[in-house]
Amino acid sequence: MEQEMKYGNDYKFIPATSVASGKGVEVLPDLYMYTTQIANICLVGEPNCNEFVLVDAGVPKQADKIIAEVEERFGKENKPKAIILTHGHFDHVGSIIELIEKWEVPVYAHELEMPYLTGAMNYPHPDASSDPGLVAKMSPMFPNDAINLGNHVQALPTDGSVPFLPEFRWIHTPGHTRGHVSFFRDKDRALIAGDAFITVKQESLTSVISQKEEISGPPKYLTQDFAEALKSIKKLIQLKPEVAITGHGVAMSGQELRDGLDHLVHHYAEYAKPNQ
């Protein structure tokens, strides 16, 4: 029997945007990134096919735009096989209930993320003191209550495989959240990193609006464990990714990506951790 789905009590539209909002970029022939205000979703699959997956579900109140983008790329008669989550923060599940109701597809996430997706546990409150940037200062207004997807969500397979994406494997990249995961394809070293690292300084309002390129650690104001986050970044560096789609910012590739990640690791304490 299906269980009723519900957003948290603090669910609301977030009045924030960027120059990338509403725009899509084909990063690879089968990897498409679309920006919902200040957060990215990823569509994995060749255009106009019926074998594709949606990774993450954007910020609140963006379901109609996500559906329109999916129909534009894949056709109105097609729907994703599943929605697969990097983690459950509000800007990655903000439109998910409407999408599930529209498409009637399963949702997958890491088992450690399940309490935040089934109404059992709220995320910690955003930390406005984590950075002097204006987005960090605004962060207490961001939703942190758990949503409840009931039996529509299930844990990712324990063997590292990704449902409906046989060429990808999921990698546990905790730190930003306990159950954060990234997705990697060995044949072309394509990485969907979620918020394990990002390519914009998300704490800065001017950087977010302009989408200024800068490889950064996960958003400080919602990161739970900075030591674990650094370990996860190092784990992803070892994969030698050739192209990366992150939860915030532009897609990056090649030497720019590798140099940026090396710089982040060597200056992690300076740039990616709160002062206190």
Image (cartoon, rainbow, N blue to C red):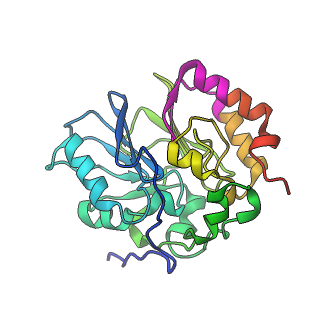
Please tell me how many numbered marks the rendered image carries.
0
- Residue extending furthest top? 255
Is the residue 231 above or below the residue 132 in the image? above
In the image: residue 114, left or right of residue 140: left
| Residue 127 placement: quadrant | bottom right
Seen from the viewer's position, the closer of residues 27 and 185 is: 27
Relative image position of residue 8 (x, y in whole percent): 49, 76
Residue shown at the point (61%, 55%) measured from the top left: 179
Say if 251 sits above or below 155 in the image: above
Q: Is residue 79 left or right of residue 12?
A: left
Q: Is residue 75 visible?
A: yes
Residue located at (38% from left, 75% from top): 5
Q: Residue 242: say if magenta.
A: yes
| In the foreground, 123 or 50 | 123
Please indicate whether residue 257 sits to the left or right of residue 80 in the image.
right
Name the image quarter holding residue 42.
top left
- Residue at the right extreme? 276
Residue range in magenta is 236-260
Q: Position of residue 256 (x, y in %)?
A: 59, 22
Residue at (36, 48) in percent of width and height: 54
Residue 49 belongs to magenta span: no
